[in-house]
Image (cartoon, coloured by chain):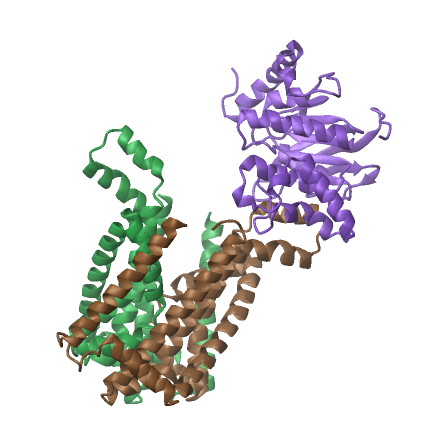
Chain colours: A purple, B brown, C green
Amino acid sequence: MPTRKAADAHAVLRGVTRIYPGGTPVHALGPIDLDLAQGEFFSVVGPSGCGKSTLLDVLSGLSPPTEGSVSFEGKTVAGQVPEGIGVVFQEDASLPWLTVRDNVAFGLRHAGTDSAEVDRRVSYAIGFMGLQDFTGAYPSQLSGGMRQRVCIARTLVLQPRLILLDEPFGALDQQTRLLMGDELLRLWRETDATVLLITHALDEAALLSDRVGVMSARPGRFIDLVETSWARERDSRIVSDPAFGTVTGRLWAALRPESMKAIGRPQP
Amino acid sequence: MNHGRRILWTRVAFIAGLVGLLEALCRLHVIKPLTMIAPSQMVQELIALAWSGELAEPALQTFIEVGASFLFSVTVGGALGAVVHALPRVRRTLDPLLASWYAVPFFVFYPLLVALLGLNVLPLIAIGVVFATPAMMLSTLAGLDRVPRVMHKVARVHRLSQLQEVRLITLPSAAPHLFTGLKLSFAYSFIGIIAGEFILSGGGLGYGISYAYESFETPKMYALMLFVLLIALVANGVLHVWDRRLARRRGLA
Amino acid sequence: MSRLTFNRFADSLILVVAILAVWVGLHAYAGDSAISAPATTFAFAGRLLVQPSFWTHVAATMEAFALAFAISAAGGVALGLVLGVRRFAGDVAEPILGSLYTIPKVTLYPLMLLVFGLGMSAKVAFGVIHGVIPIMLFTIAAVRNIPPVLLRTARALRLAPVKTATSVLVPAAMPEVVTGLRVGFALTLLGVLIGEMFASQRGLGFLIINGINNHDVRMTTAVTLLVVIFAVAANSLLLAFDRRVHHG
């Protein structure tokens, strides 16, 4: 396991804004400054429509910032998704015409990796995500949670050093979400990757993260950064720790006025 | 599966019952032999026609025409659909035309096509193409519209080239709609061409039926009608089975 | 908003100009013996529209069409509702109907003539066999796609069966049924016109085939033009209605 220095900035956003042009330009995001430390688990919470997904798009290189700069491992992110960044989307992005195994292998097969190596990594990812009994199944035969596991496994085989997840468990029920959260923590520890998780669930952010960024209503900016100081070995049983309530409470205190704005009821 | 089989057998029994009823009505002369011959006689006539070699020439002509129209419609309609999908302004302009296309009774254009292309198989293929191409185009547009947006992001995250994205993501994702386009292109080519042969006396099976009708060869006419019906049924059956297989390959059947 | 309206208008104008350009091109290529020029055709069509004899043909077509469409719509919706509600019967029937839809129905035309004889009833029957199947298929799909939660809501509100039908089932199935009627409308018209081309001495289809037989190109082109304008106009109206019930 490579040594991890918390001070190393793995990905950096400086003065990033995103404005969607048009008849009336929409200022969706920023300005945002953010340093993601090497190996940290960082979550972003914010009211609906605050630009959380836009932040992920800009950080991954899926869309360019209107102003400011993004860098990953010291290199500017521009125009395309750099090698080493993996993304798991909010929508079901499993490929319905491929079996679970072919879905997981998708990225490697088209990157020219040799087939023995593909087999080894795919089998590992499938085992890691608990999909070994479903390798021949098609996504339509799986539940939403299982499909999201397929998408995570598909990202995992590429051995990303920065994993971005956009509300990956948004469509799942609460119990499944907690368990998937545990899987995610396990994956984070095992791979030593830096993780950025976007979520609307305060409890999810509180129990998974080292740090949580709270975003304002649109245009999204960070209005609070909350450190959790959990041990690296942790799981969803944290919910019974009194500190969990304190962290969640602080997140909601920061977020409540912004959420009121987002549903059109500004506080008097 | 059991339920599916029950449906299938009920369907077979229903059709067999109808054919049986028709057979009885014809045999009992409730339906006059001049109006319709019994289904069993149609089969005998068809076999006789095939045996004598009289069937081969018109059937071959129709097959070639339908095949040419089908191939042309699928390739050109698919390409047009892809191009128009990429150009929203052009699409908006063409939208009223495509929406009204199948409201236009195209049969009224047959004479024009003969004048343009001469009295040979070309106007027949052309009418098939005119009928079938927009169906393929509309299916392609529908298929491309329904490729989920996230699929494009998946392609970018995997750093696929444009060509790879089309081959590995876009085409498989749109496949069910493209297949519908294939089915419609075949059906419309077939309908347009048989009708064209019938109306223009242009040879082939359609003309065979109209000629037999006009020369009061009722048995021959019904044999040819049965043959056309059988082609439609067999083609439908093959496409249906293929469709099911495609669906199963996505775990849907 | 006004910019958008202007763009729409410009798009339609471009389309009309493009169609006219194709027409002029075809005329230049094939000459007067195949198709008459746009100006000539419009002038001739204008003269047709003031002739009482032309209107008797229009009336004949409209009569047959109205009857055929009424039968297709009533029969198609009624049978479609039954097959939609009765799941098993619907499953049995649907592929049969699908196959019937792909049969070239022109080939059944001699049979229609033998059964119905020359004249009105053959024209109507020909319109019906074209129009009724798509209306049935759309209606079956419309009934099947009603979300079950709507029926449970009706039961939760303790609606009487008749009330359930009128205030839940019909409005929920309506949009798809309207789409089916629009498709059926066009195909019924097609069927009636083909019927008239062979089985009639009156009607617009007869005028077209008669123009062909007498090498009266102006007549054929003008009547074709009027039929196309009518079909496209009716379809546009139905399409507007269709879109309104789908979004409303």
Q: In the rendered view, does A72 fall on the left or right side of B27?
A: right
Where is A139 relative to B221, above or below? Answer: above
Residue shown at the point (24%, 80%) measured from the top left: C198
Residue shown at the point (70%, 39%) measured from the top left: A125
Looking at this view, is A34 or A115 the one in front? A115
Quarter of the figure with residue B117: bottom left
For the image, the number of numbered tags is: 0
Q: Position of residue C123 (x, y in %)?
A: 21, 73
Where is B78 relative to C156, above or below? Answer: below
Q: In the rendered view, does B148 fall on the left or right side of C166?
A: right
Q: Position of residue A242 (x, y in %)?
A: 64, 9
Q: Tell me if I can see residue B138 in this picture.
A: no
Q: Tell me if I can see residue C29 in this picture.
A: yes
Where is B206 relative to A114, above or below? Answer: below
Looking at this view, is C230 or A150 the one in front? A150
Residue shown at the point (50%, 25%) measured from the top left: A264
Quarter of the figure with residue C160: top left
Q: Position of residue A192 (x, y in %)?
A: 78, 31
Q: Position of residue C205 (x, y in %)?
A: 26, 77
Looking at this view, is A129 or A185 the one in front? A129
- Check the image and name the residue furthest to the top: A242
Q: In the rendered view, does A223 fall on the left or right side of C232?
A: right
Looking at this view, is A43 or B220 the one in front? B220
Quarter of the figure with residue B174: bottom right
Where is A25 relative to B210, above or below? Answer: above
